[in-house]
Amino acid sequence: MKKRSLLFAAGIVCALSVLTACGKNYYFAGRNLPPSGVLNRVLVAVQNPSPLSQGALLFDDANYDIRHSYNNQTATFSISGYSGKLPVTIQNMPEEQQGAVYSIGDGNLTLIDYSAEKVKSTIGGSNLGGISQSVFVSRDLNYAYAAAQSLHSLTVYDHGSSIALNLPGVYRVSMNPGNTVVLAFVQNTNDVYSVVHLNDNQRQAAINNPNWNGAVDCEPQNLPTYCVFPVSTSNGASFDRPVKAVFSADGSAAWVLNCGPECGGTTASVTKIPITASSLNPSGVGASGIALVATQTIAVPGGATNGVFDGNTFYVAGQAVLTPGNTYTVAGQQVQGNNLLAGYLSVINTLTGQVTGQYSISDGTHNKMILADDNTLWIGSSQCESGERYNLSQTSAPGTPFGCITMFNIAKNSAVIESYKGDGTGIAAVTGLHKVYTAEGGQVYIYNTTDGSARDNSNVTVTGTAYDVSYMDGGSDGNNTTY
C-alpha cells in the first residue's frame, strides 16, 4: 500500500475512534475523555453506602444503564478521593467539567473534577459557617455562599477567605450564573436580601459601621469587604414568604418565588427584580446587586416554591391550600376544599405577565425541576404522600397516582405521575438518550422521556441511600437541578 493510502486509512481510523482520538484527549465540545472511557455518566450521591462510610459518589453508564463497564472489566465506577458525610446535593457544571457536592454530615463542599473522575478540592464546613441549609459555588470556584440558619449567618467564601454576615433566620441563597447577583432569604419573613462586594472607597466609608448605607450588616467591621442589603420594592411589587430566585434565560431579571399560603403566608406569586447596570456595584467583583428593586408581582394561585425557564415561559411548581368552601381540580377530579395541599404546575408568560395554564401534578414540596428530551419537564417533590392525591387514592378515587415524580409534556400540557417510591430527591436529564435518572426513596430509578414508562434499574441500584443524581456529560450547565 502506498504511503498516501496508509495516511488516509489512519485518518479514517482517527475519525471513527472516539477513545483513542489519535493523541487528542477530548470527545465532546473540547471536553477531556475521562479515565473510565464512559461518555454518558450519571453521578449518584449515596449516603451510608457501608458500615465504614457515610458517603460515596458513584456514577453509572447511562448509555447501557449499568454501574459496571460493559465488558465487566470495571465492577463499579466511583469518584476517587471522596470522603464526605451524608451528601445531599450536586451542583452540576458540565460545561466546566466539574461539580460541587454538599454534605450535610460535615458541612463540606467537595469540588469534583469530571474529566479526571476524582476530587479536585474541598471547601471545609468551617469555611462555610458550619452546617448550612443552602450552598452554592461560582463556576470559577473562587466564590461560595452558604446560609447557616442555626448560626444566623450568611457566609461568603472569597478566594480562600471567609466572611460571615449576620442575618438572623437566613436559610436559603440563590446565585445567578455570572455571580453578579446573590440573593438571601430568611424563613417566615417577607424580605429578600442582596449580598454585595464593596469597592475600596466604600470599604473605607463603612469602617465600624455595620449598617452603612442601609445595610443589614457589613463585615468584617474593622474594614468591611461585604455587606448585605434589603431588596426594595416599587410599583406595587411585594414579597410573600420568598424562598428562592430563578434567573431569566437572558439574565435580565431575577424572579423570586413567593411561597405564600404553603409557607404560612397570604398569596403565592412570583416577583421580578430587574438586573441592570445601574443596580450593580461598579466594581464588578463577585456579588454586586447594590441597588436592586422589585418592580412586578404576578399572583400564582397554584403555589410557587420552584421554577425553571424555557425562553420567556416560566414553569412554576408549588402547592395550593385547598380552602374549605372552594372547588378545585386535582388529578382530574372535582374536590371540595379540605385544608389539604395539592400540587400544581403554573405556566407563566413573562412578557405578558399572565398565568396561561395551571395543571395538577404531584403533591409535596417541589425541590427539583429540569427540562429533558421529548418536550418534557420533570418535577420532584418530598412528602407527596401527605396531600390531596393520596387522600383521593384512599377515599373517593382509588387508584389515583400520588408519586413524588411528575413528567409534564410541555407540548401537550399533560402530566404523568409516577408510582409512589418515596421522596423524589434527585433528577438527572440524560439528554440525547431520551431518559431521566431519579433518586426516589433512597434508590435510583430510570424513566423514558417518550412516555414516562419505567426502564430496568436492576443494574444501577445502590447499597445505602441515593439522595441526588446529575448528568455529568450534559450539554450545558442548564442540566442542573441545584440552582
Image (tube, rainbow, N blue to C red):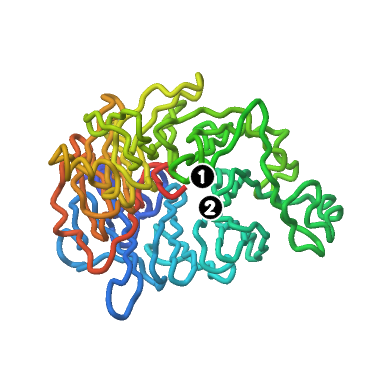
**Res. 316 mark:** none
Find the distance from the CA under tag 1 to the CA under tag 2.
7 Å
Disc 1 residue type (three-letter): Lys
Q: Name the quadrant containing residue 55.
A: bottom left
**In this picture, residue 404 sits left or right of residue 193:** left
**In this picture, residue 286 sits left or right of residue 451:** right
Label 2 crowding class (10 Å Cα cut-off): few <14, some 14-19, many 20+? many
Q: Residue at x 19, y 57 (%)?
A: 66
Please, what secondary structure does the residue beneath circle 2 have? strand
For marks 1 and 2, the one nearer the N-term is: 2
**Res. 244 mark:** 1
Please say whether residue 190 is visible from this viewpoint: yes
Residue 435: x and y in percent read 23, 43
The single residue placed furthest to the front in the displayed view is 325
Residue 472: x and y in percent read 36, 52
From this view, report whether residue 121 is shown above or below residue 415: below
Please say whether residue 21 is visible from this viewpoint: no
From this view, report whether residue 152 is shown above or below residue 212: below
Q: Nearer the viewer, residue 325 or 90?
A: 325
Residue 160: x and y in percent read 63, 65
Q: Are marks 1 and 2 in contact (CB under 8 Å)?
A: yes
Q: Nearer the viewer, residue 474 or 307?
A: 307
The single residue placed furthest to the top in the displayed view is 352
Q: Residue at x 54, y 55 (%)?
A: 171
Disc 2 residue type (three-letter): Arg
Q: Name the quadrant containing residue 462.
A: bottom left
Report which residue position mark 2 lands on: 172
The single residue placed furthest to the bottom in the displayed view is 52
Q: Nearer the viewer, residue 268 or 479?
A: 268
**In this picture, residue 230 sits left or right of residue 382:** right
